[in-house]
Amino acid sequence: MSYTPIRLTEDDLFNHLPEKIGQVSLNYDHYSGKDLYSDGEIEDILLDIVRNSPSAAYQSVIEEKKSWPILYHLSSVRGNIVASLPISKEDKVLEIGSGCGAITSMLSEMAKSVTCVDLSAKRSHVNAYRNQDRDNITIHVGNFADIEPNLDCDFDYICLIGVFEYASSYIDSDDPYVDMLKKISKHAKNNGRIVIAIENRLGLKYWAGCKEDHNGEYFASLEGYPKGGSARTFTRNGLEKIFGSCGIDRYSFYYPYPDYKLPWAIYSDKHLPGKGQLTDNIRNLDRDRLKLFDESRVYDTLIEDGEFPLFSNSYMAILGPDIDLKYAKYSNDRDPRYAIKTEITSEGVKKIPMSPEAREHVAQMAKNHDLLKKRYEGSKLKVNKCTFNEEEGYALFEFVDGITLEERMDEALDKGDKEAFKALFDDYYERIDYNNGENISDLDLIFSNILTKGDEWTIIDYEWCREKKVEAREIAFRALYCYVLEDERRNLQDIDELFEKISITPNEAEYFREKEVTFQKEVTGHHLSIGEIRANIGTHVLDAVGLAEKKLRDILDERIQIYYDRGMGFSEQDSKYVPDVYEGPGHVVTDIEFKGDIKNLRIDPADDICLVKINELILNGMDVLSDKKFIQSNGKMIKTGSFVFETADPNLIFALKDVLIRGENVLHIDMEIVRISKALAENISSSVKKLF
């Protein structure tokens, strides 16, 4: 599938402005005739795609095009940021900065009507074409400041998703952020809500080496945007100051993860992430990045100290009455039959289908509960209660308090307590193997789906059950496989021992791995994961620490260390480094000045195994290169002036007692240095022994 973009000029747009595209209405009363904001050719490509492809084909297009803008504008995952808002079919929604319509699509599914405002006619056409079957969308094209006076003042929700940071582009004032929010607030009905999704200025990804999202500069937001630009992001405290300046005192913060653009989870102050949960951090789909540290480990430190909200990559602030949402997790990058979301509310834990096809999958969870409860009756493994709400089509689980088995196993690994880890695994295996003759098996008995409170263990999620007997060892293998796969820090060096303990041979392990890959492909509908798409897009992650160490090593390597023996031998205290001695790669030329009290002089040519060839060695104008008594070494001499060193601490010692030394002396040295492997050094050295 390939697309040749239809390039629309500004004249084309101005002269052919449709008032309707499908059932979507477009209003140009305040359109200047020019798109003042454009991403260029990519918008023509997007327009061609949405004109000629159904939304069901977008995922295939994303995988084929291998492009961040295509992913960003067409992915259904974009809509997750608003998918858990309690928007009903009675609600009016205003979306400011609707762009190409990724959020509009989700809002129009949920609301009675969606009124969009966007600066770009071309982007609005993309929005309209992708949603042309929806009869509840109106798009106003033009600058928000011009359109705003004519908007209704009774919206239930006003959404600014990735827009508030551009307030200075919409509002010309000394304080555009406050003034824009004041203008927007007038259009919300009493008890209406304003939803702002925005990057956190102090987001951990920026500290860890991601470029700032808007200007592509390293550390730009952390440094206060020294190079300027139209976009500004804020800390939580900075946003709260803006809210206060607008007289807004009712608001709540949510924390989209990894960020608001493609979120798979949304946390809140009522349900913050636990240690070990934030491991999906390499998400640089738009540009290359550095990696300064392991974000997962730093997140664990922040979580432990209660500082996660300060460093969340993004915020979603909801201004107005609280909503009944503590946490949401999205699994809608799957085959439509399995596309669901999980929400924790005051009612409990809900599993909600995100497509009509997924209703049957969700309904099956209540049946799974009844079958599993019967199997594990009388065991040391409880099954969390689940019921299915026929009218609203969701499964409701009781909320159970405790810590996951995964967290306990992580704690054992962190402490280096292998015996505790093995004991937990043995206990796990014994519990899941109970009553194994029953024709019901929970394939999803992974460690994160078991909540522990003392000796009471509860299965809290059993999405993937089979009404047949599956051996406990296969289920345990999958638990270990997922445990290691989800976090690279979990390096289970004794995993083969665990497999052996539950009688899994290497061939069976490989067979189980293949089954898991097949299962995952079935769940995803054979589509690529975000991680696989990132790899195909081709952005790079550069290990900044490794690069810095290499650069430092290069700097250190481009100097030599000189030791002075004044009759007491050589010591680090009586030595110095001489920088700037390299005239070219591996070529040292320098003059070493020393006083007449020096008995011996030592030069360390490198901090590595190497070959050294001395081209010139001149003391006070006299050639001493051929004087074998003058030169000593801890390497092996190949021939006059050439040495091989098997040690990473090579040295050349010059004996000064038998040569003419003055009060002021100069030793001129010209030598070539080549780093080699230890094996090569040993081979050369052994050859020398045979020759001499």
Image (tube, helix red, strand yellow):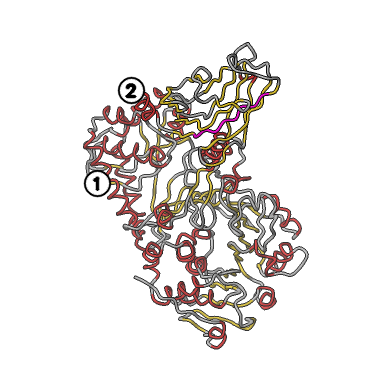
Residue toward you, 180 or 208: 208
- The residue that appears at 43% across and 47% down in the rendered structure is 397
> Where is mark 1, residue-wise?
467
User: How far apart are the alpha carbons under marks 2 and 1?
Assistant: 77 Å
Which SS class for mark 2?
helix
Point out the tag, 2 or 1, that comes first from the N-terminus. 1
Q: Position of residue 306 (x, y in %)?
A: 61, 38
> Where is mark 2, residue-wise?
691
Which picture quadrant has residue 691?
Answer: top left
Residue toward you, 306 or 632: 632
Where 85 falls versus 423 (above or below)?
Answer: below
Region of the chain picked out in magenta, as a range: 665-672
Where 382 falls versus 497 (above or below)?
Answer: below
Disc 2 crowd, CA 10 A, few/some/many (<14, 14-19, 20+): few
Residue 624 visible here: yes
Q: Position of residue 264 (x, y in %)?
A: 47, 53
Q: Indicate left or right for 353 with 629 as reference.
A: left
Quadrant the C terminus occupies:
top left
- The residue that appears at 51% across and 29% down in the rendered structure is 607
Q: Is residue 670 magenta?
A: yes
Q: Residue furthest right?
A: 174
Residue toward you, 579 or 120: 579
